[in-house]
C-alpha cells in the first residue's frame, strides 16, 4: 500500500522531507502541500504533481491524504496535530510537538481518548546509526550503570533572529530527547552556566552555554551548546559508566595526508550530519503505517517532556537557578505506571 502524505509547511525542512518521501522512501507519495506562502507551496508541489491546498485543515481533511506531515513553524504545530487526531489520521510533527506544555497535554489527552497512537515527533537522532549503537552498548550493560554523560552541540553560526532561549528550545531539545531515550531515564532538574561569550555572536546572544541536567537515577549530564563555533557542525556525546565508556562516532570521512598534515572533513550543517537518520526515520514511519501499525518513534509524551524540560532550561538560564522539570505522571498509554 502507498501511504499518501499531506504536508503542512513547505519551508527548509518541509522541502527536505518532501524530497525524501518522493525520492528515497519507498511506499510513500506526497499528494498535497500547503504553506501560508502560496508560492512556496506551489514550488514544492508542482515538480511532484501534488495538489496545493489552501490551509492545514484542508490537508488534514483531504480524501487523498492518509497521513499528515507538519513542518510549519513551531507555534502552529499544536493546531495541525490536534486536527489530525480529530480526523483519526497519523501525524508526523517536526520538533517541537508544541511550544507550550498546555498544548502538549491537549494533544496527549486527544490521543489517549482516540485510544491508538497517531502522533510521532521528529526527533531524528534516535535513528542515527551511532546513537543506536551507543544505546545497544548501554542496554547490554557492557559499560555498567551510566554515571555521567558529556555532550556538545555546535553549529557554525546562527542568524540574528536566534535568541538565547533557542539554545535550549531549538538546539538542546535534540539532546534532551536522545538522552532520555539512551539512558531510559527522566531529566529532573536543569541548570545553565554561561562562560565568557564568544566575540563572534550577535550582541544579544548568550553563546556558548553549558547546560547541566540531572536524571531521576542520578546521572549528571553536561551539554555545551555553542552555536557560533565557526568551524563546523559538530555533535559529540560520551557516556561514562561504572565499567567503561561509550562514545558517539564522528561521521565517516576519509583521512587526507598532504603537505605534512593529516585531516578529515568536519560537516557544516544538520542536513548532512543527520541525512541517514532522517531517511531511516521516515522509512520506519512509512513502513509502520503501510503495515497498519501504530508509529513506534518518539511519542506525544516524549514531545511533552522535551517541551517542559527545555522551557525549564530557559527559566534556569534567565534566573541563574537550578530548576526542577516538574513533569506530570506519565499515563499508562505511554508506558507509565499510572
Ligand atoms: N529535526 C530537525 O533537526 C529540524 C527541525 N526543524 C523544525 O522544523 C520546523 C520548520 O523549520 P524550518 O523548515 O527550518 O522553517 P522555515 O521557516 O524554513 O519553514 C516553515 C514553513 O512553514 C510555513 N508556515 C508557517 N506556519 C504555517 C501554517 N500554519 N500553515 C502552513 N504553512 C505554515 C512558512 O511559511 C514556512 O514556509 C520547525 O518546527 C523547526 O524546529 C527545523 C530544522 C531542523
Ligand atoms: O534542529 C535543528 C535546528 O532547528 C537548530 O537551530 C540547530 O541548532 C540544530 O542543530 C538542528 O538540528
Image (spheres, rainbow, N blue to C red):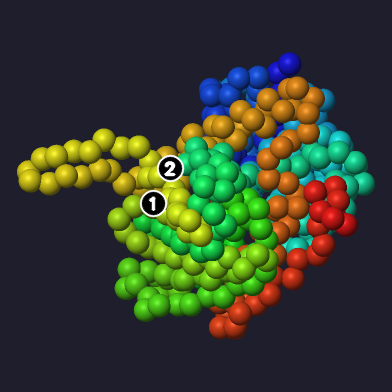
Whole-percent x, y for residue 284 in the image: 64, 30
Residue 15: in sight, yes or no? Answer: no
What residue is disc 2 on?
273
**Quadrant position of residue 126:** top right
Label 1 CB-ligand 2 distance < 8 A: yes
For this orientation, the residue located farthest to the top is: 1
Q: In which quarter of the image is the N terminus?
A: top right
Q: In this view, does 194 lie to the left or right of 308?
A: left
Residue beneath the point at 63% across and 44% down: 122
Whole-percent x, y for residue 294 in the image: 78, 33
In the rendered view, tell whether residue 48 sits above or below residue 75: above
Residue beneath the point at 43% across and 60% down: 152
- Front position in the image: 209 or 261: 261
Task: Decide: few, some or many residues near mark 2? Use Cα within 10 Å; few <14, some 14-19, many ≥20.
Answer: some
For this orientation, the residue located farthest to the left is: 259
Residue beneath the point at 68% across and 40% down: 297
Q: Is residue 296 left or right of residue 334?
A: left
Amino acid at each position: 500500500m502507498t501511504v499518501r502524505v499531506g504536508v503542512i509547511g513547505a519551508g527548509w525542512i518541509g522541502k527536505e522531507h518532501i524530497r525524501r518521501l518522493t525520492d528515497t522512501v519507498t511506499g510513500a507519495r506526497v499528494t498535497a502541500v500547503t504553506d501560508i506562502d502560496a508560492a512556496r507551496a506551489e514550488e514544492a508541489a508542482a515538480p511532484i504533481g501534488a495538489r496545493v491546498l489552501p490551509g492545514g485543515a484542508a490537508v488534514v481533511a483531504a480524501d487523498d491524504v492518509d497521513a499528515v506531515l507538519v513542518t510549519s513553524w513551531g507555534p502552529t504545530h499544536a493546531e495541525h496535530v490536534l486536527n489530525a487526531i480529530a480526523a483519526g489520521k497519523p501525524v508526523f510533527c517536526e520538533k517541537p510537538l508544541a511550544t507550550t506544555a498546555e498544548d502538549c497535554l491537549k494533544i496527549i489527552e486527544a490521543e489517549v481518548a482516540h485510544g491508538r497512537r497517531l502522533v510521532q515527533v521528529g526527533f531524528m537522532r534516535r535513528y542515527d546509526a551511532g546513537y543506536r549503537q551507543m544505546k545497544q552498548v548501554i542496554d547490554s550493560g557492557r559499560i555498567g550503570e551510566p554515571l555521567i554523560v558529556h555532550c556538545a552541540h555546535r553549529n557554525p553560526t546562527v542568524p540574528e533572529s536566534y535568541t538565547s532561549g533557542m539554545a535550549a528550545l531549538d538546539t538542546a531539545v535534540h539532546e534532551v530527547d536522545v538522552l532520555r531515550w539512551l539512558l531510559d531515564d527522566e531529566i529532573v532538574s536543569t541548570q545553565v552556566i554561561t562562560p565568557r561569550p564568544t566575540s563572534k555572536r550577535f550582541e544579544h546572544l548568550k553563546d556558548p552555554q553549558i547546560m547541566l541536567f540531572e536524571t531521576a537515577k542520578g546521572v549528571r549530564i553536561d551539554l555545551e551548546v555553542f552555536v557560533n563555533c565557526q568551524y563546523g557542525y559538530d555533535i559529540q556525546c560520551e557516556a561514562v559508566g561504572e565499567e567503561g565508556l561509550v562514545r558517539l562516532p564522528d561521521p565517516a570521512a576519509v583521512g587526507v595526508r598532504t603537505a605534512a598534515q593529516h585531516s578529515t572533513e568536519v560537516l557544516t550543517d544538520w542536513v548532512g550530519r543527520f541525512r541517514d537518520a532522517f531517511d531511516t526515520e521516515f522509512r520506519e514511519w512509512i513502513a509502520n503505517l503501510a503495515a497498519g501499525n501504530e508509529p513506534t518513534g518518539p511519542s506525544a509524551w516524549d514531545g511533552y517532556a522535551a517541551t517542559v524540560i527545555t522551557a525549564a532550561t530557559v527559566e534556569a538560564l534567565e534566573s541563574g537557578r537550578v530548576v526542577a522539570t516538574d513533569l506530570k505522571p506519565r499515563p499508562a498509554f505511554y508506558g507509565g505506571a499510572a
